[in-house]
Amino acid sequence: MKKNKLEIDYLEVVVDVNHKPEEVASCYQIISDEKYNFDESKIKYRSKKILSEFDSIITLQSFSLLNDYNSKLKISGNFYKWLNGHNVTGCENLIDLVLQTIEKLKNLNLVDPTKEQLETIRLGNFRIYRVDVKRDIVFDSKQNAIQYLSTLRNLSTYPKQKKTIFENGIYFGFTSKRWSICSYHKGQEVRDNYKRSKTSLELQALADLMIRQEIRIQSKQLATWDLCFGHQWRDLNNIENFFKNKLDKIYIPEIILKDSKNNISDKSDRKFYNCVINGDHKEVYSRSTISRKKRIFLDKYNIDINNL
């Protein structure tokens, strides 16, 4: 297996960039006191979802009031997926990802940054309120990836964090308001969300080989770790080592991965095996056949179907 470099997934940032508030707002919101004194009320702009040509979404929210312009703009979403239609691959550089997003918003006539504003962003002088970082572990086969996930689900631990198990993965610190870690099979996640992703057959094949590890960091924890400003993410080696240390604290016993080219010569058994790997054996085979095949695979091939 191979552990890829850390990449940026979800982001929520506030940047200083010229924009027309009405173009990035879904509606107005009136803020008044308890006595509904509308003379003293303020009218702010509600956030707006921006759909890309890939049907991916980011959300924009202007900090302006109706009669009080403010150039600060909040941008939140999976920037890479919005730009590329998928997040099977990704971008290592947080600042570059923000700049690419600003450039596309400019092409959509939603923002109009000055050279000074772009330079400010390039230097990392903007606030970050949430980041999801990811690392992909790539295996030689889908079988090996699923075997690794099964071991994670059953035997893994993390210091001072409770484990929560889901059908396609696990969380450590699931209910934390500061940060959490999750691991899941990327191929299954892509299939589960196929309507929200433009994933080619090649990328789907790559995703099937992946176990994705994600760390979600909220605003308070970003401040604690000194990572709440863009310029604190400029040293990519430091960021890589910092989060590698966090991810490597996941304890998992040594795994002897099964040979992905195991000798299943019987055509019927091979067909069943492929269905199990693809996750559709319960739709294709009856319960009695599945039960019988499980015994055959244990006796004949020393393969536990439940752990695939």
Image (spheres, rainbow, N blue to C red):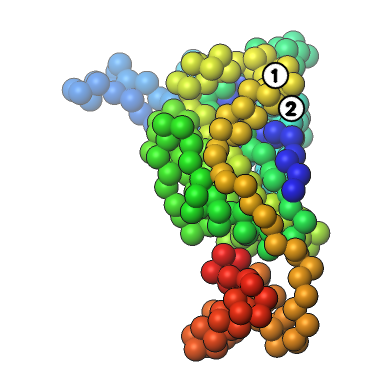
Residue 50 spot, x, y in % from top left: 61, 42
Tell me the residue at 61%/20% (across/down). 15
Q: Position of residue 298 (x, y in %)?
A: 60, 76
Marked residue nearer the N-terminal end (1 or 2): 2
Q: Quadrant of residue 16?
A: top right
In x, y percent, where is residue 72? 57, 19
Write the residue at 61% across / 79% down.
299
Res 94 → quadrant: top right
Residue found 62% across the figure and 59% down from its top:
147
* Residue 279 horizontal/vertical position (percent): 60, 71
Q: How many marks?
A: 2
Residue at 72 percent across and 56 percent down: it is 209
What is the three-letter code of the residue carrying label 1?
Answer: Asn
Is label 2 in a helix, a strand or a loop? loop
Residue occupied by mark 1: 238
Q: Nearer the viewer, residue 54 or 71?
A: 54
Q: Nearest to the eye among marks 1 and 2: give it.
A: 1
The vertical placement of 199 against 221, above or below, is below
Q: Quadrant of the C terminus?
A: bottom right
Q: From this viewpoint, which residue is outermost toward the left?
A: 35
- Return the residue at label 2: 93
